[in-house]
Image (tube, rainbow, N blue to C red):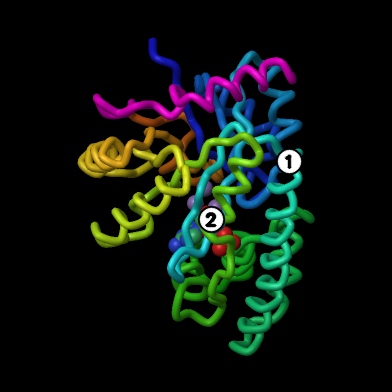
């Protein structure tokens, strides 16, 4: 049997609902063999997740999902096999957290002007002192009755052209790749289909990313049409990029994404775990645990 990889998941260290420990336990119960925890702009869950995985005999990959502003749009770049202690990475992430904190206040001020008070406090409480994200605002607004669920409040309040939307001022693509590389990690473009780029724009991104030393793209993500996966796999090969796969799991209540329930990589794809830096890092990792 091929190993089951899930290389993109979230915990309470960012906007997931399971603690890093429960998340790893769930992944193990769902027969995941190799798991990467990739919280938004945060590495605080990695230690406990690695220890839990070690106890269960599950292979664990320390990861991150970095928020990027590229040509005025937000992108997500996953870093795999990173060293969270690396100073360049840690300092870079501090900058993103500072923006997140400022943005949280700004979202709240904008919502208040529309007659919705207390959003900052509400979201902050749900974030439990960790990374504060739009997801926390969405959960608060849904609980407070401003919509029927998280999806609906996102659509009405938190996306472009809606009252609580604040444009991202995240890391540049160059910075992101330099932080991931400095920490010994492998950079992967997260969920490329979700940006709804034109074919030309996507090719431009793949070209720039590859020039900067990026290694891979997520060819498989949850809820993606098989034809899209096949197309991404071909494009990865054209740009000499490796293929990754991840569920982007956040919450067991969201039935459409479960841990490790992913189709295999298309035939002809080169798995990211076969890239050179991956094996180097896995060796380092198994020595460290
Ligand atoms: P942030 O990085 O704080 O801007 O929040 C981005 C996160 O919000 C993503 O990682 C998703 O988990 C979530 N998200 C973004 N758009 C939506 C949406 N339309 N519906 C539900 N969740 C969303
Ligand atoms: Mn998220
Ligand atoms: Mn993402
Ligand atoms: Mn994600």
Residue marked by disc 1: 86
Give me the disc on residue 174.
2
Is residue 151 in view? Answer: no
Q: Is residue 240 magenta?
A: no
Q: Position of residue 199 (x, y in %)?
A: 24, 57
Q: Position of residue 55 (x, y in %)?
A: 71, 16
Q: Residue at x 76, y 70 (%)?
A: 121
Tell me if residue 233 comes above or below residue 29 in the rendering. below
Q: Secondary structure at mark 2?
A: helix
Q: Quadrant of residue 242?
A: top left
Q: Position of residue 138 (x, y in %)?
A: 57, 65
- Distance in Å between CA atoms under marks 1 and 2: 17 Å
Q: From which residue to which does the magenta span run? A: 264-289
Quadrant of the rendering where the N terminus is positioned: top left
Q: Quadrant of residue 175?
A: bottom right
Quadrant of the rendering where the C terminus is positioned: top right
Tell me if the residue at label 2 has its CB under 8 Å from ligand 3.
no
Tell me if residue 226 comes above or below residue 284 in the rendering. below
Give 123 or 62, whichever is nearer the viewer: 62
Q: Is residue 162 left or right of residue 198?
A: right
Tell me if residue 188 comes above or below residue 75 in the rendering. above
Q: Is residue 283 magenta?
A: yes
Q: Is residue 96 left or right of residue 71?
A: right
Q: Position of residue 130 (x, y in %)?
A: 74, 53
Q: Residue at x 63, y 28 (%)?
A: 24
Q: Residue furthest top?
A: 1
Q: Secondary structure at mark 1?
A: loop
Give 196 or 174, whichever is nearer the viewer: 174
Label 1 environment density (alpha carbons within 10 Å; few <14, some 14–19, many ≥20): some
Majority secondary structure of the magenta segment? Answer: helix
């Amino acid at each position: 049997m091929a190993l089951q990889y899930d290389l993109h998941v979230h915990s309470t260290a960012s906007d997931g609902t399971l603690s890093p420990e429960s998340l790893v336990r769930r992944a193990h119960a769902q027969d995941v063999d190799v798991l990467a925890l990739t919280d938004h702009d945060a590495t605080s869950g990695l230690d406990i997740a690695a220890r839990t995985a070690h106890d269960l005999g599950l292979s664990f990959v320390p990861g991150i999902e970095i928020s990027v502003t590229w040509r005025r749009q937000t992108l997500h770049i996953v870093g795999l096999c990173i060293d969270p202690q690396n100073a360049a990475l840690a300092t870079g992430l501090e900058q993103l957290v500072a923006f997140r904190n400022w943005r949280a206040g700004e979202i709240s001020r904008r919502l208040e002007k529309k007659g919705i008070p207390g959003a900052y406090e509400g979201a902050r409480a749900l974030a439990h002192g960790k990374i504060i994200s739009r997801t926390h605002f969405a959960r608060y607004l849904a609980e407070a009755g401003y919509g029927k669920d998280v999806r609906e409040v996102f659509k009405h309040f938190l996306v472009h052209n809606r009252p609580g939307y604040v444009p991202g001022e995240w890391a540049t693509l160059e910075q992101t790749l330099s932080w991931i590389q400095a920490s010994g990690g492998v950079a992967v473009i997260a969920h490329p289909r979700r940006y709804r780029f034109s074919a030309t724009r996507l090719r431009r991104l793949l070209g720039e990313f590859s020039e900067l030393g990026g290694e891979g793209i997520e060819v498989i993500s949850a809820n993606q049409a098989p034809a899209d996966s096949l197309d991404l796999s071909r494009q990865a090969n054209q740009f000499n990029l490796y293929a990754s796969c991840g569920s982007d799991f956040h919450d067991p209540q969201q039935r459409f994404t479960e841990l490790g329930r992913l189709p295999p990589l298309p035939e002809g794809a080169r798995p990211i775990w076969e890239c050179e830096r991956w094996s180097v890092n896995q060796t380092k990792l198994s020595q460290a645990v």
